Image (cartoon, rainbow, N blue to C red):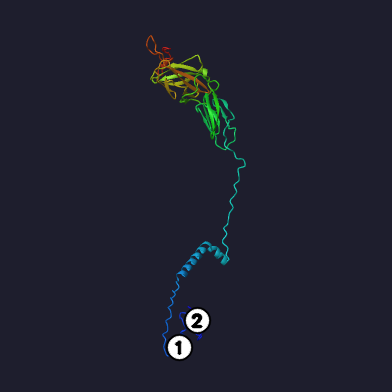
Amino acid sequence: MSLIKCKKCGEMFSDSYKTCPFCEEDDAYYGGRATKRRRRAETPRRKAPSILGPVVVLVLILLVLLVVWLLFGDQIKTAIGGQKPPVEDVIPEPTPTPDPDPVEPADTITLNRAVLALDVGGKETLKVNEETTETCAWSSSDPAVVTVSDTGEVTAVAAGSAVITAKVGSAEATCSVTVKAAEGSDTTGSTTGSTTGSTTGNTTATVDISKLTITATSEGGYEGDLASTSETGVFEMSAKAGEVWTLGLKGTDASVTWAMDGDSNGVCKLEGAKVTVTGTSSGRYATIVGTVGGGTVKAIIRIPTISVRTAERPSVLCVFRRKTQKSTTKTPRPVV
């Protein structure tokens, strides 16, 4: 809505009037007639401004300020207060010292000896030629013949042969060891088998094998000498199944160790010096070795052959007498 200046009277009036109301009043007043003033056109009322918009804007501003404070509050406080953040003491980590000469695991190894010959009781130390940081494991294929320590020391126990194996990781090396019997001992027969036996008498004596005789004593009180053979230090006797004999040795006070030489072939069992005959197959025999004073003697226990004429088995191949019998007369028994 705007105002218009009347050209006639010079008054200002609203443009909602077609003519100047002041001039019409004057005309009516001076003309003797009253004129009815026109009502002004109603203008639409303006709505009151809403406060919702400013409130929303204010909330958004506060949220932005809160996020900024959460993210950069420490920096803002430091910049305002002039305080520096605390500095943590940093301790440098020690630099590891590399191994100057690292030793890699060996793929293959060798020993200082590939073949070794020893006498009974002899010793020799084997070594791995390659340098390695891993532990070497030693083993013997037959500890009854040769033993080996954790340091590679080989000890000959009995006549025979065995293989010593050294293992480092996955690598292996072997040494073949042959053990010879001591001088003066009998090397006839097998060198492996049961070593169960007993030791009696003086352990330091040295004896002459040719002057020794093996004796046998039965549970019934009979004792006698085993029959000698053409071989020095080897004696023989025959015995029936179920008989029990205790072996002895005449001609020395030295200690005697009895052991089965090889397989017993089912002929007998040896417990110390006690021999229990178990075999029934005629002609079979077992050899028992007695070690004394650095030498050995042998007792051959044989199952007798059945006589065709008498169908009787001969007794042991030796002359027996009762211990209580004072007479020195010996009664010979049949000999095979």
Near mark 1 (Cα within 10 A), the count class, few <14, some 14-19 or many ≥20, is some
Provide the residue designation for mark 2. Answer: 4
As rendered, which of 141 and 150 lies closer to the eye? 141
Q: Nearer the viewer, residue 139 or 257?
A: 139
Of discs 1 and 2, which sits in the foreground? 1
Secondary element under disc 1, as helix, strand or loop, is: helix
Instruction: Residue under label 1, please give it.
Output: 27
The residue lying furthest to the right in this view is 100
Three-letter amino acid code at the position of disc 2 = Ile
Q: Tell me the CA gap for discs 1 and 2.
A: 19 Å
- Picture coordinates of residue 23, whole percent (x, y): 47, 86
Q: Is residue 204 visible?
A: no
Q: Is residue 106 above or below residue 119?
A: below
Which amino acid is tagged 1? Answer: Asp
Which class describes the residues within 10 Å of circle 2: few (<14), some (14-19), or many (20+)? some
Judged left or right of residue 210, residue 240 is: left
Please, is residue 33 above or below residue 145 in the view? Answer: below
Nearer to me, 80 or 148: 80
Residue at horizontal 44 percent and vertical 90 percent from the top? 31
Q: Is residue 330 left or right of residue 79?
A: left
Q: Earlier in the sequence, mark 1 or mark 2?
A: 2
SS at mark 2 in the image: strand
Instruction: Report the residue at 52% width, 31% height from top.
Output: 139
